[in-house]
Amino acid sequence: MTSNQQPQLQLSLRELSGFALFRDLELNEIADLCTGAEIRVHRHRELVFESGQRANRFGFVLSGAYKLSRISPSGEDAVIYFSCPGDVVAALVMPQPNSTYPVSVRSMGPSRMLVISRDVYNEKWLARPPLIIQVQSLLSTRMVRFQNHRAMQRAPLSSKVAALLLQLAANETTEEEISIPIPLTRKEIAETLGATVESVIRVMSEWDKKGIINTTEQNIKILQPALLVEQTEG
């Protein structure tokens, strides 16, 4: 950690304590887990970790969101998951010797990540079994969502798009109108769902006309969540 990052990290300790992963820890314990960490601010679509690259660091999402993807056999960029604040990225491979990143990670809109070294994870994080259980729980939730996407492969496209939008809005307000917290293009939705861009545009344009959602170029607001839930049921 550079000297000019020290005050920034100290200010972020209380921010970290607000996340579920660190909520039961004292500030000095959080600081210990963040030894040598850096807070990095990423521009929209900036590459953070690259698939196949030596995995020597992992990240904790502070704000914004990050897209996890990998190249499919057909050469397309297949989106695996969107990590939002409170999520851990690339922690699973830290204990594995000579491991590489299984996916590429790019920021979605201006985003912030706390980046921590593999050595700190193996020395300090693994020494706290309750913390590792919580990390594994986060990763399990991610796998469940991924499996849910796979299970919906035969569902109508409208159901799949609705389920994805509701998933991305899950950590947001419970009010009637819900804003998707990341800039999301129709192409990225199509890549996530294995659909064509044109078909996704048709589905979302119909919802826009009906007042179910409101869309701009990259921003999506769910105006009638209940109707979108109905869409997930086919």
Image (cartoon, rainbow, N blue to C red):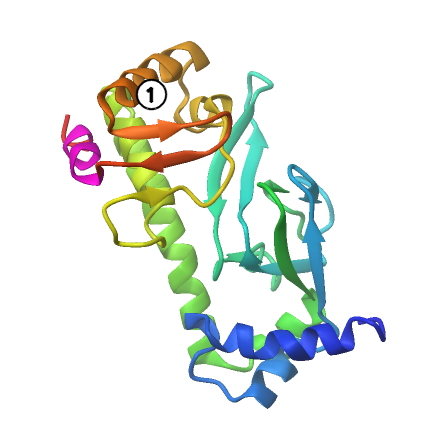
Q: On the rendered image, what quadrant is the C terminus found in?
A: top left
Q: Secondary structure at mark 1?
A: helix
Q: On the rendered image, what quadrant is the N terminus found in?
A: bottom right
Question: Which region shows up in magenta?
Answer: 225-231
Q: Eyeballing the image, is 64 above or below 233? A: below
* Badge 1: residue crowd in 10 Å (few <14, some 14–19, many ≥20): many
Query: Is residue 53 shown left or right of residue 125?
Result: right
Residue 58 in the image, given as x and y percentages of width and height: 63, 59
Give the residue at the far right of this rendering: 3
Residue 70 in the image, given as x and y percentages of width and height: 57, 33
- When asked about the image quadrant of residue 10, the answer is bottom right
Residue sitting nearer the eye, 205 or 191: 205
Residue sitting nearer the eye, 120 or 171: 171
Count of numbered badges drawn on the protein? 1
Query: Is residue 175 shown left or right of residue 51?
Result: left
In the picture of the structure, the residue carrying the numbered disc 1 is 204
The residue drawn where x is 83% and y is 72% is 4
The residue drawn where x is 32% and y is 48% is 144
Amino acid found under the numbered disc labelled 1: Met
Residue 200 in the image, given as x and y percentages of width and height: 37, 17
Q: Residue 99: in sight, yes or no?
A: yes
Q: Main secondary structure of the magenta part?
A: helix
Q: Eyeballing the image, is 73 above or below 162? A: above
